[in-house]
Amino acid sequence: MTNLKTIAIMLIFAVPAFFLGRVIWPDPMGGIMPTAAQLPFYVILAVAESLTFGFGIAFLIQTWPKLGRVPVEQRRLTAAAILAITWLLVNWWPHDNLHRANGMNTQGLLYIEYGFHITLMLAGIVLIYFLFDSVRSFTDN
């Protein structure tokens, strides 16, 4: 991934993500709001999540087209690893926004927890399998 291209793609997605978070997922009526002292820390977190979201999209855009260069027998696992890495990077933006917008809805919280946490666990397992498969292919030669 070229640095300048990566930064450009990242910002194309990160800037709108930052500003659209509360538009897509509005604050719940009567929900708790951060104090003035806490607000900057939430803003920093939102910036970090938006940048990471943009970086994940940049990673996907730049790596997916190169999948054809991967040997056929490794292509499915490599594709799964690319998608796992992308998910590990992009999930934080919708994840935290959904938590905030969900308020005190415990059923919604269960959906969020299962939808994000289980898929993040699976992404980690895919990456472990990918790493072991890659190391095995290096040591078998």
Image (cartoon, helix red, strand yellow):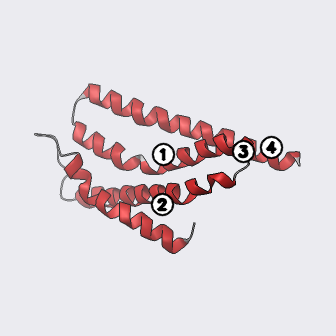
Assess whether mark 3 and mark 2 are in contact (beta carbons under 8 angstroms).
no
Looking at the picture, which amino acid does disc 3 mark? Val
> Quarter-wise, where is residue 112 in the image?
top left
N-term-proximal mark, 4 vs 1: 1
Q: CA distance from mark 2 to mark 4?
A: 29 Å
Assess whether mark 4 and mark 2 are in contact (beta carbons under 8 angstroms).
no
In this picture, residue 45 sits left or right of residue 80: left
- Report helix, strand or loop for mark 2: helix
**Residue at (45, 35) in percent of width and height:** 117
* Residue 58: image tag: 2
Q: CA distance from mark 4 to mark 1?
A: 25 Å
Q: In this rendering, which labeled residue sits more in front, label 2 or label 1?
A: 2
Q: CA distance from mark 3 to mark 1?
A: 23 Å
> Quarter-wise, where is residue 99 in the image?
top left
Q: Residues within 10 Å of mark 3 (few under 14, many from 20)?
A: few
Residue that protrudes farthest toward the right in the picture: 141
N-term-proximal mark, 2 vs 4: 2
